[in-house]
């Protein structure tokens, strides 16, 4: 438990620093004081109101969302890799994020669900993700159930289809501003985080983390193969079905509020296995904390590297993830000798 405790402490410190840093730098002591005033109903002086608003209304929701999404991506990535027995799998391999992108693009470009106001894009993205889940499941399912290979191939194929639909929608979009917004969203951002959107996403992800942690033993068995699972009394088809649906809902909820953030769900599970071993009880305890810390620091870099502009998160996670992933591949045991 030493590593999870250290990561939990690092997450708290990282969050406090990330909330204080930005175009307006606020020292950690004042940041902590403003946060305490917000949660305890305390008072601050009149000349501190603007700094308090920056801390509580703008940066805190964003940092919390980064931590939640980072934790969720790491946990879902580890789960999907066991679910399909593929070390290259990540939360987006099953086409869920591509479906979410289609939903978000449709809402942004054509004003669908306008009655929902600022929540329209998130609702559209989640609806698109769930629609993609249904299509992938229906296409991959056979009379004998769902095999890992068929699930992956179906998800990848439909993901290309969804991306084609999204490209067509953007190509015929009437406004360039909306197109730029959509392209930025599809590369990942926490810039839209508000106190209205964070609680829902956090609740879905936290429930998913708890359920996945309780299913760690099942994931250990599924990673051994269907025949081994059957010999141990585990119905691989049934387990894979409900785990697929659960990961789809969690991934859809994350994609709805942050867009597509690559490499976190791919690389963090492998790094975690190198640190704590392959047992999913340990992996699903450590990976979410590691993913949360990584996401908080990547988001801080995204909004401070080239002020006043903000870099897409997907660009930074790729810059970090690609060399790290190549390094992991060179350690053959990280991929089972592949």
Image: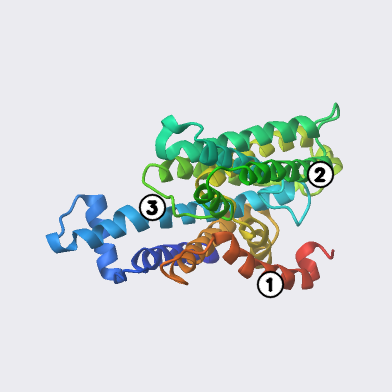
Quadrant in the picture for residue 163: top right
Q: Is residue 70 above or below residue 202?
A: below
Identify the residue position indicated by label 3 in the image: 61
Mark 1 / mark 2, whichever is N-terminal? 2
Q: Residue at x 84, y 29 (%)?
A: 142
State the separation of the CA atoms marked 1 and 3: 30 Å
Sequence-wise, which precedes: disc 2 or disc 3? 3
Q: Quadrant of residue 227?
A: top right
- In this picture, is 158 found above or below 291? above
The picture places residue 26, in percent across and down from the top left corner, at 29, 69
Local crowd size for mark 2, using a 10 Å CA cut-off: few (<14), some (14–19), many (≥20): some
Secondary structure of the residue carrying tag 2 is: helix
Of the image marks 1 and 3, the number of the one nearer the N terminus: 3
Quarter containing the C terminus: bottom right
Colour scheme of this structure image? rainbow
Q: What secondary structure is found at the residue carrying circle 3?
A: helix
Q: Position of residue 45 (x, y in %)?
A: 13, 61
The N terminus, quarter of image: bottom right
C-beta proximity under 8 Å, tags 2 and 3: no
In three-dimensional space, the C-alpha distance between marks 2 and 3, rounded to whole angstroms, equals 37 Å
- Give the spatial CA distance, label 1 vs label 2: 26 Å
Which numbered marker is on residue 294?
none
Q: Is residue 242 visible?
A: no
Describe residue 256's horizontal placement relative to residue 330 as left or right.
left
What residue is disc 1 on? 323
Q: Local crowd at mark 3 within 10 Å, few (<14), some, or many (≥20)? A: many
Farthest residue, direction top: 143
Residue under label 2, please give it. 153
Q: Where, by quadrant of the figure, is residue 159 drawn?
A: top right
| Residue drawn at point x = 64 percent, y = 32 percent | 131
């Amino acid at each position: 438990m030493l590593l999870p405790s250290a990561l939990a402490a690092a997450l708290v410190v990282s969050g406090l620093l990330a909330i204080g840093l930005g175009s307006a730098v606020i020292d950690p002591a004042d940041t902590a004081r403003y946060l305490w005033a917000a949660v305890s109903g305390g008072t601050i002086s009149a000349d501190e109101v603007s700094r308090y608003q920056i801390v509580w209304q703008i940066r805190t929701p964003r940092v919390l969302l980064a931590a939640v999404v980072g934790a969720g991506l790491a946990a879902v990535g580890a789960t999907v890799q066991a679910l399909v027995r593929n070390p290259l799998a990540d939360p987006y391999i099953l086409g869920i994020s591509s479906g979410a992108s289609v939903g978000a693009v449709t809402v942004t470009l054509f004003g669908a669900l306008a009655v929902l106001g600022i929540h329209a894009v998130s609702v559209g993205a989640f609806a698109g993700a769930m629609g993609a889940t249904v299509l992938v499941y229906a296409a991959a399912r056979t009379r004998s159930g769902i095999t890992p290979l068929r699930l992956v191939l179906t998800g990848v194929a439909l993901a290309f289809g969804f991306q084609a639909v999204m490209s067509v929608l953007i190509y015929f979009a009437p406004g360039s501003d909306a197109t730029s917004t959509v392209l930025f969203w599809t590369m990942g951002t926490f810039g839209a985080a508000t106190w209205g959107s964070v609680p829902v996403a956090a609740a879905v992800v936290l429930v998913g983390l708890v359920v996945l942690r309780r299913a760690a033993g099942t994931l250990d068995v599924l990673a051994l193969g269907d025949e081994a699972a059957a010999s141990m009394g585990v119905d691989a088809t049934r387990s894979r079905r409900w785990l697929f649906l659960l990961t789809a809902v969690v991934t859809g909820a994350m994609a709805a509020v942050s867009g597509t953030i690559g490499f976190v769900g791919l690389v963090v599970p492998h790094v975690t296995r190198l640190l704590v071993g392959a047992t999913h009880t340990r992996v699903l305890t450590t990976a979410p904390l590691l993913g949360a810390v990584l996401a908080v620091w990547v988001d801080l870099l995204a909004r401070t590297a080239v002020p006043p502009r903000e870099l897409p998160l997907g660009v930074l996670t790729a810059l970090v993830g690609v060399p790290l992933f190549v390094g992991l591949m060179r350690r053959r045991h990280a991929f089972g000798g592949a």
